[in-house]
């Protein structure tokens, strides 16, 4: 949508620039709107009728704090709470937000308000709420396995008019075409099965959405379809048709024995014909190849191109509506006259056909986006990247294109500024240079009349100074859990925060980067530089190359050593050296993996050799672990390629600590020298897994590794019952390094976001 009004944007920018002095200056606080967390709930395991839920006295129910896993026999758990609107929410449109996995139905005073499918849901509890008004909330949750949790409930005071916008923005979705689910299945079948006359009668029948576990394998799927007269009320005759394929993670599409398309990254999109004919039979064969992880033909749809283009229009409109929604959520005083106009325009198109309606709504949103460029909101508040000898980078994202500047200084004075090139943009990056070492600076970001809070950061400490580093990972999928964990981290006063990957659920989704990682990071990211060891979830959709555009958009990692990239790099701080590796392509061709003589392998060896002579402590960070004992998805013992190629190098070159995630729990092993390269026994390094950053927790121990000491209970092979132990906790790890002494503390979080105390601690000493 942006391209259609690019010129108008520039014209309006210069007009809006002249109005800055006339606009009231507004500070966007970390919490822009008043809110009330709903932590304590009455809970009942087992199903009841809604009528009984309403009648049951609270004393007959257990009192629970949120974020407690549940897996009841009949799969149902009820929660209820009576609330009273406090004075601070009076006069607002009070929003009720629920985060639950996997699904729930929310009732207020016995009437359904909304349903949640896949973690998050919200609706207005009261428009122009009155202080003292009472409401009874009932929530029916459904068990989805080991990760079933009620994560969060919150009341937020939104400006009056938001209620109407939230109602208006929910547009009906066009249908998705015909899903083809029944296939003949040939695992590792020869390519001759692509022929139109291949006899597949002996092949088993298989549905889509069934994985196979063998990596670097392939499977063939075959079926026949007869074109109907219509698909979702769209005429087939004379119209182009599309076959949409979603697979893990590359493949081929054959039509009537002819190869029509090769695809990578899991998405195939094939125009079957320029003019469909009802009654025509098509023979389809799809080859799916998995390069890592599990293989799967996830979903195949037949859709008219007319419906496909309509759906694309709807997707564009929904993206724009979601961005406007985030503007309302983030801006402390959103321009509700613009929001109200959009709401009225949407409601005024109800009786139009979908194509015309979407076009008009799109035009309305474009005008709103132009108008809001002079009063932006921080989608991502300022965060720090790439701290170096005399410089640091400040990055942030605004809802709409605008310009910005950073004002900064020392001793309470913000007497320096750096201004961006005056070209409107949503993603902002300014590097402050000429900074003094081992000093404290204050700074603020300005965009038109909007300001960030004043934050402080410290420049590099001397090499012999004590440092504190926080490490955590796998915060994806559940932003509220990550949000709470970061609040705890903010009290640590760390020098750096390192993430061992899987910071987002889907790396191709820009919204995921905002909601799951950077926005929760707001409590600490503006004061402490952060770095990421890229995980497999960051790679969603870009499986063919080591290129992830959203990742590169949001990070600025140091490229200080020859051969390093944004994906594998190193950082020096104090007397310690931190090496970040990318094991996601360990078996990939073209030298992009970590196998011997690959670009990353050679860089890693050279970087490590240099660090041996200059650094007291050496850390290696990689998302996937070389060793792992716990995994909820089935037997998993870490990554064999890492044990084969990387572990011997680390063990022979004085790596002290190896940090990973991927497994969503806490595990660690202390050094047990010497390491024997021939047998893989013993270890000179401490292996740590810190994957409790916010995603669903793992809770089953499958293996016993000599290299792992904690947890110390034994794995029981063939036992699929979940384990219970305090290492299956949301947590982060603190390293305090002082000369030749290293102290590790793993700190866990309670379900309500409060400090849960010490999970583990140990110390290492150099002679």
Image (spheres, helix red, strand yellow):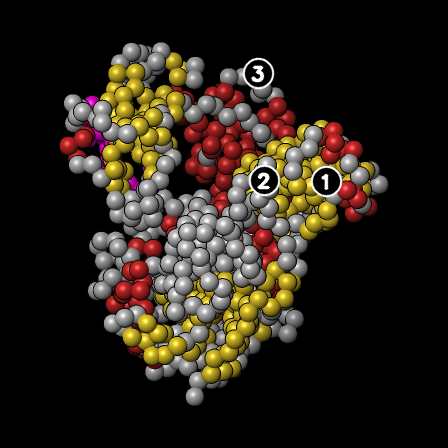
Residue at image position (27%, 65%) is: 645
Residue topped by disc 1: 80
Marks 2/1 in contact by CB < 8 Å: the verdict is no
Q: Tag on residue 351?
A: 3
The x, y position of residue 46, in whole percent, is 65, 38
Residue topped by disc 2: 73
Circle 2 packing at 10 Å, graded few (<14), some (14-19), many (20+), is: few
Q: Return the residue nearer the eye: 139 or 431.
A: 139
Q: CA distance from mark 1 to mark 3?
A: 39 Å
Q: Main secondary structure of the magenta part?
A: strand
Indicate left or right for 46 with 495 as reference.
right
Q: CA distance from mark 3 to mark 2?
A: 47 Å
Q: Which residues are magenta?
A: 246-262
Quadrant location of the C terminus? bottom left
Residue at image position (25%, 61%) is: 595
**Residue 262 image-quadrant placement:** top left
Q: Can residue 517 be seen in the rendering of this structure? A: no
Residue at image position (55%, 27%) is: 171
Q: Earlier in the sequence, mark 3 or mark 2?
A: 2
């Amino acid at each position: 949508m942006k391209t259609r009004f690019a010129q108008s944007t520039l014209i309006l920018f210069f007009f809006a620039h002249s109005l800055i002095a006339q606009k009231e200056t507004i500070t966007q606080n970390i919490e822009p709107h008043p809110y009330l967390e709903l932590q304590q709930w009455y809970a009942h395991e087992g199903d009841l009728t809604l009528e009984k839920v309403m009648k049951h006295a609270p004393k007959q129910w257990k009192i629970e704090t949120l974020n407690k896993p549940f897996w009841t026999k009949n799969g149902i758990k009820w929660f209820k709470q009576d609330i009273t609107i406090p004075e601070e929410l009076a006069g607002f449109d009070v929003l009720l937000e629920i985060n639950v996995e996997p699904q729930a139905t929310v009732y207020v005073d016995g009437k359904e308000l909304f349903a949640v499918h896949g973690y998050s849901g919200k609706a207005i509890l009261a428009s122009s709420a009155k202080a003292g008004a009472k409401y009874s909330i009932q929530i029916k949750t459904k068990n989805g396995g080991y990760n079933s949790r009620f994560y969060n409930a919150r009341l937020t005071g939104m400006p009056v008019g938001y209620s109407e916008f939230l109602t208006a923005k929910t547009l009906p979705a066009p249908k998705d075409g015909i899903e083809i689910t029944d296939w003949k299945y040939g695992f590792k079948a020869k390519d001759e099965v692509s022929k139109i006359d291949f006899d597949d009668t002996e092949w088993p029948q298989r549905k889509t959405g069934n994985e196979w576990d063998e990596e670097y394998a392939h499977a063939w799927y075959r079926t026949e379809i007869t074109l109907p007269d219509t698909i979702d009320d769209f005429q087939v005759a004379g119209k182009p048709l599309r076959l949409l394929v979603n697979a893990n993670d590359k493949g081929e599409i054959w039509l009537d024995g002819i190869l029509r398309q090769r695809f990578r990254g899991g998405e195939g999109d094939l125009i079957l014909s320029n003019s469909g004919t009802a009654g025509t039979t098509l023979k389809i064969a799809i080859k799916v190849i998995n390069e890592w992880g599990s293989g799967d033909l996830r979903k195949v749809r037949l859709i008219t191109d007319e419906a496909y283009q309509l759906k694309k229009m709807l997707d564009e409109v929904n993206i724009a509506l979601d961005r406007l929604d985030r503007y309302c959520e983030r801006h402390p005083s959103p321009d509700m006259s613009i929001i109200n106009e959009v709401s009225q325009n949407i409601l005024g198109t109800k009786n139009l056909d979908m194509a015309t309606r979407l076009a008009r709504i799109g035009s309305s949103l474009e005008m709103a986006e132009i108008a809001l460029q002079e009063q932006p909101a921080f989608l991502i508040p300022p965060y720090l990247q790439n701290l170096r000898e005399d410089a640091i980078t400040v990055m942030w994202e605004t809802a709409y294109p605008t310009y910005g500047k950073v004002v900064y200084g020392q001793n309470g004075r913000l007497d320096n500024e750096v201004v961006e090139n005056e070209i409107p943009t949503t993603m902002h990056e300014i590097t402050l240079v000429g900074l003094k070492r081992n000093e404290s600076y204050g700074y603020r970001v300005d965009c038109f009349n909007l300001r960030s809070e004043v934050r402080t950061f410290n420049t590099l400490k001397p090499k012999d100074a004590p440092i504190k580093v926080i490490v955590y990972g796998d915060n994806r999928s559940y932003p509220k859990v990550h949000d709470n964990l970061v609040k705890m981290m903010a009290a640590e006063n760390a020098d750096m925060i390192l993430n061992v990957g899987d910071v987002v659920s889907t790396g191709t989704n820009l919204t995921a980067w905002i909601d799951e990682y950077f926005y929760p990071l707001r409590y600490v990211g503006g004061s402490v530089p952060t770095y990421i060891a890229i995980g497999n979830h960051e790679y969603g959709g870009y499986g063919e190359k080591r290129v992830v555009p959203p990742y590169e958009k949001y990070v600025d990692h140091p490229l200080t050593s020859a051969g390093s990239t944004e994906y594998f790099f190193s950082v020096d701080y104090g007397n310690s050296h931190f090496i970040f590796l990318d094991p996601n392509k360990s078996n990939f061709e073209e030298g992009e993996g970590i196998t011997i003589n690959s670009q990353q392998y050679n860089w890693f060896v050279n970087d490590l050799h240099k660090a041996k002579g200059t650094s007291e402590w050496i850390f290696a960070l990689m998302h996937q672990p070389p060793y792992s004992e716990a995994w909820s998805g089935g037997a998993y013992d870490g990554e064999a390629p890492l044990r084969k190629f990387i572990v011997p190098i680390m063990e022979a070159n004085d790596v002290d600590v190896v940090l990973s995630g991927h497994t969503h729990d806490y595990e660690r092993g202390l050094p047990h020298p010497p390491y024997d390269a021939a047998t893989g026994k013993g270890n000179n390094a401490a292996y740590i897994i810190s994957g409790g950053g916010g995603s669903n927790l793992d809770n089953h121990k499958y293996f016993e590794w000599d290299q792992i000491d904690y947890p110390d209970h034994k794995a029981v092979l063939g036992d699929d019952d979940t384990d219970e132990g305090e290492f299956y906790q949301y947590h982060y790890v603190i390293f305090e390094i002082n000369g030749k002494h290293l102290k590790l503390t793993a700190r866990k979080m309670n379900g309500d976001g409060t400090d849960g105390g010490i999970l583990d601690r140990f110390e290492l000493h150099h002679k």
